[in-house]
Amino acid sequence: MKKLLLLAVLLAPLVGVVPAQAAADNGVAVLAYSADQLAAKFVGKNRKDIVSAISTIPVYEKTFTASDGTEYEAVRYGKTNEEYRLFLFKFKWPQPLVAVVENANGIMTLNERYQINIPVTQKDVAAHAPAGAALTTVTDVANNATYQVYQNGNQFMVFQNGLLVHTFDNAQDYSAFMATITASNSSYAAEQAQEQTNLEAARLAQAQNNTQYVTTRSYVVPTVVGTAVLGGVVWGSIYHHNHHRHHYRPAPPPPHRPGPGPRQSGGGLAPGTPLIRGADGRFMNHPKR
C-alpha cells in the first residue's frame, strides 16, 4: 500500500496534477499556463482548492443556471478585454472543476455544451478572430438596434453593445435572422411615410382654414339695410354674410337731447311768468286780463 502511494506522488508531476497544498506554496501564476495546462494541473480539484492555490485574486465570479436547472460558478482571472483564464465549477458543493478556457471560442463552447450564458465580448472575439473573418454592421431601425456581425466561414456571431447575443452555425439560419430585420425595417419605413403624409395633409387643411377665416373676417364689406337719422348720426342694422350665417346688430337708442324751450304765449309773457294785480283787480303786467 505504501508503494502505491509513493508511486502516485512520483507520477503526479508527469500527468500535470499538482496537490492543492503544493500549488498554494508555489503560488500558481495562472496566466503563465494555457487553459489545457491548468485543466491538467488541477484535475479532480474543487473551487476552494484551486482559488487558494492561485497567486492572484479573481476579477470575475458569477453563477449561471443551465436550462435544466443545474447551476455553475464561473471564476475568471485577467481583466476584461485582456488575456484571461476562466474556470467553470459546478455550484453544488464541493464545487468540482468542470473546465478551463482562455478565449471567446472556449466560452462559446461552454455555453453550448452546458446550456449557460457566460458573456462573450466583441473585443475578445476580434482579438482572436482569424484573418479571413468578415465584419458587417446591421441596423434594426424599428427596434433602434445596431448589430456587429462577425462571419468566419459558415459561423456568424452577432454582437450588440459589445456583447454576443446570437450565434448561427450556418448561412440559412443567419439569412432567416436577416430576413426578419429587413421585413421589420420595411414595415417601419412604410409607417413613417404614412405618418408624414397624414401630418402634411393636416398642415395643409389647417392653413386653408386659417386663410378662410382671415378672408371672411377682414374683407367682407358690410351692407347697411336700414338707417335712421338721429341727431346727425346714421344708425342702422348691419348684415354680414359669414359662412351662410346672418348676424344682426340692433340700432342703439337715440342719444338724449334737450327739447325746445318754452313757447311764447300770446301776451308776450313767457309761460310761467307770475301775474301782478293792481288795486282795481286787474293784472298789471298782462294787458288782456
Image: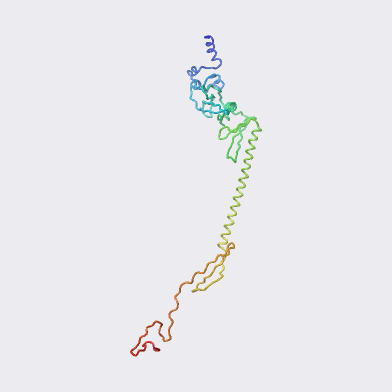
Which percent across, then down, holds residue 240?
56, 65
Which percent across, then down, holds residue 3?
53, 9
Judge whether 9 appears above or below 90 on screen. Answer: above
Judge whether 64 appears above or below 258 on screen. Answer: above
Judge whether 184 appears above or below 113 on screen. Answer: below
Specify the farthest residue to the bottom.
Answer: 280
Judge whether 4 appears above or below 267 on screen. Answer: above
Q: How is the image coloured?
A: rainbow
- Quarter where residue 127 is shown: top right
Specify the farthest residue to the left.
Answer: 279
Which percent across, then down, holds residue 76?
52, 26
Q: Is residue 171 left or right of residue 12?
A: right
Viewer-closest of 186 and 227? 227
Which percent across, then down, holds residue 276?
35, 86
Viewer-closest of 110 and 150? 110
State how many labels appear. Answer: 0
Viewer-closest of 25 and 92? 92
- Quarter where residue 98 is shown: top right
Specify the farthest residue to the front.
Answer: 281
Quadrant of the image containing the C terminus? bottom left
